[in-house]
Amino acid sequence: MNTNALNIKPNEPGPYDLVIANGRVIDPETGLDATRHVGIKGDRIAAISATPLQGTRTVDATGRVVAPGFIDLHAHGQELPATRMRAYDGVTTALELESGLLPISDFYADVAKEGRPINYGASAAWTYGRITVMEQGAQPPLPPPDGTITWFDNAFAYTGWQNTLATDEQVTQILNWVETGLKEGGIGIGINGGYAPGYGRKEYYALAQLAARYDVPTFTHVRYVSVIEPNSAFEAIEELISLAADTGTHMHLCHLGSTSGCDVTDCADLLRKAQERGVRVTTESYPYGAASTAIGAQTFRNPNWMAQRGVKSYSAVEYDGQPMTEASFNALQQSDPGAIVVLHFLEPETDPADQKLLDTSVLYEGAAIASDAMCWTDSQGNLIQGDVWPLPTDAFAHPRSAGTYARFVRQYVRESQKLPLLEALRKTSLIPAQVLEKSVPQMRGKGRLQVGADADIVVFDLNTITDRATYVEPAQTSVGVQHLIVNGEFAIQDGQLLLQSLPGRPVRRPVQV
Ligand SMILES: [Zn+2]
């Protein structure tokens, strides 16, 4: 935990560039929850005051919550329109950590050229290294990775990288790719193990050791998602915990809920006991009972996959908003293995017992809320990217790509009152900042509403904030975010996205090459 050095900073003198007046100001680190005026100078918070402040510009936030902008540790869609959807959901920083990208320098350069409304960043992707090494000589040949997710989607046409054990020499080559990504400033190591479950335990051990050497976290989608043994999620989480204990590496378990499915009670218990013993594991969850993944993924290749995921019918899988049949499932897996489908592993909307299971992961003490937001595709399945806005009405992605944070606040704070607002905002801002701040110094200035902190701020109406994205019509922005301020500039003002405003900056570790 950091020493709260930020909290004791006195207010800087005015006038301020921007004042947010009269809001219900919340800082999850100090516990501040009171009517305050916030003064911003440049890209920093310069004053938090009980008495009015003078600013070049002032916005009135009476009756609204003023909180640290939401920090999303798990955001695959890094394209411009995907980040615009996220801005409406109150997110000021969205990072691709679970899967990651390579080469890292290409990713940051490409994004910087185009600009983003919110802060962005990525981890070094183990899978990209593994695909490159394991598919050497494959026919037709796979081009080298180019820092995009499209390259990864195309790799699903090949299966050797997914289910083949690497030789010692191949492990060395894979690790070289990953290490280069760390030297280029990648935020830790993305270990998307569920997509390449054929890795050896020594390969994973070597990755954990590499992370320890650079003192960065790993972000794992564990290799098994089954609720029945052997090769269960429980076993895969044990594998992660044991490596964290052996190596001392900080290992982050991605989407506790969707990984564990209906076995979440035991999986959460396992994780909690490890944390109580001081093992450096952290986690995250999203507030949906459906997962989203490529139909060609290994999780769908086992003939017993339905029992493994705890679902009873092919109709639990939806493609483009429509339930699938055995025939349409098999046909799509054959023709387009990279196609993204939605899998309902719980039915919280209709089954109170399933809602309880979902709550076990969402309310897990110390878990961040992270969206696992996917890229948006058009009705032909093509990636929607570039300066596109609004999204076409037929744009498709899991609704969590648009509504995770507004949904979480609506359902858990306003409607069911399972969490006080301050606790909820810890999970959306402070906790994700703390997951990263030891290895990414920039994050110490985020996730807090304090003098000296980055001016990444969400102003929202607790009475109206809601997600609108559904499984059938996902391309709908959240509503209720009045203002979104990123590095001191408006990305959203009076509920409207400012299309020309691109104040997002890279979140990145220092570059060593
Ligand atoms: Zn995942």
Image (tube, rainbow, N blue to C red):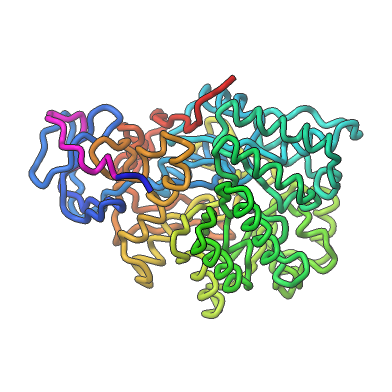
The quadrant in which residue 96 appears is top right
The relative height of residue 290 versus residue 90 in the rendered view (above or below) is below
Question: Where residue 179 appears, x then y in whole percent?
Answer: 66, 31
Question: Where residue 386 appears, x then y in whole percent?
Answer: 56, 31
* Residue drawn at x 68%, y 61% as measured from the top left: 318
The relative height of residue 322 versus residue 32 in the rendered view (above or below) is below
Task: Please indicate, yes or no, whether residue 395 appears anywhere in the rendered image.
Answer: no
Left or right: residue 136 versus residue 21 is right
The quadrant in which residue 381 appears is top right
| Farthest left residue in view | 51
Query: Does residue 18 show up magenta in the picture?
Result: yes
Task: Please indicate, yes or no, whether residue 199 appears anywhere in the rendered image.
Answer: yes
* Residue drawn at x 16%, y 48% as measured from the top left: 36
Image label count: 0
* Residue drawn at x 68%, y 53% as measured from the top left: 293
* Residue drawn at x 84%, y 56% as measured from the top left: 331
The relative height of residue 11 versus residue 219 in the rendered view (above or below) is above
Q: What stretch is highlighted in magenta?
A: 4-20
Task: Please state which of residues 440 and 84 is positioned toward the viewer in this rendering.
Answer: 440
